[in-house]
Amino acid sequence: MAEPWFTALSRQCVDYLFPPLCIICDEKRVPHDRWLCENCKRALRENHDGRKPCPRCGMNRRLGHCACTQGWEQPFESVYSILDFDATVKAIMHQIKYREKRRFALYLGALLADLVPPEVFSAADALIAVPLHRKRERGRGYNQSLLLARGLVRGHAGRPLCEGVLQRVRNTASQTKLDRAERTRNMRGAFAVVAGRAQDIASKSLLLVDDIVTTGATTAAAAKALLNAGCASVRVLSIARD
């Protein structure tokens, strides 16, 4: 049913007086896309297309370095990162983590799902997100990795998302200013499977979703907890690789 002419006219007037702007660059975006302009979406696609990821550690080999050369030994099998952590991705993550853009996280996960090779999803029985500690999640109001995972599932239906299975039992210090060894010590014993939920992941191959992978310390600690609880294997899917 066609909308009334006055409704369409009113919306055109609003768009003219208050043009919809991109959340990242403030350039005009098409009204039906709530968050990003075409230039920023193109930048994300070019970022992805410019990656030649190591199949094990996920680093972009076109940048001339690979974590595997530094003794990359992790409990998870591999990392697949959709993007390199560049200025656009940094701005996006800032909006999601510190500007309360929870719906933007869902949008981003669904938007990027098409960039993930189908075999990354098909190799897993289920997805599971890296959790925040309850104190930090209360302060932020949500877990951005869980919202990104929900968006990924929405954009690529076919694999379930296990929620409420993995918990962060220690409120660890920020990893930002820590080196590799310090990050590993900081995350030791930080995660555990919720009592009574181990059967939900028993013998399953899991795809662990995180926003950004840097040294892999956080995802390693989470993977250890999942493997100790009886899952068959863990692979990591991150929005970006730093």
Image (tube, rainbow, N blue to C red):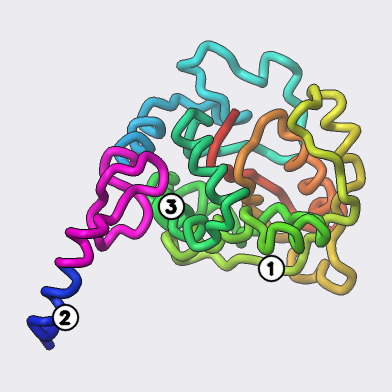
Residue for badge 3: 113
Label 2 SS: helix
User: At 63% across and 44% down in the image, what residue appears?
Assistant: 236
**Range of residues picked out in magenta:** 13-40
| Secondary structure mainly formed by the magenta segment | loop
Any magenta on residue 21?
Answer: yes
Q: Relative to 201, is 85 above or below?
A: above
The residue lying furthest to the front in this view is: 17
Residue 7: image tag? 2
**Residues under numbered marks 1 and 3 in contact, where contact means CB atoms less than 8 Å apart:** no
Label 1 SS: loop
N-terminal of the pair, mark 1 or mark 2, is: 2
Q: Position of residue 53 (x, y in %)?
A: 50, 27
User: At 87% across and 27% down in the image, what residue appears?
Assistant: 182
Q: What kind of residue is marked 1?
A: Glu
Any magenta on residue 103?
Answer: no
Q: Is 16 on the left-hand or right-hand side of 100?
A: left
Q: Quadrant of residue 155?
A: bottom left
The residue lying furthest to the left in this view is: 5
Q: Nearer the viewer, residue 14 or 175?
A: 14
Q: Quadrant of residue 177?
A: top right
Select label 2 or label 3 by which is in front.
2
Residue 13: image tag? none
Q: Is residue 149 among what the camera can see?
A: no
Residue for badge 1: 163
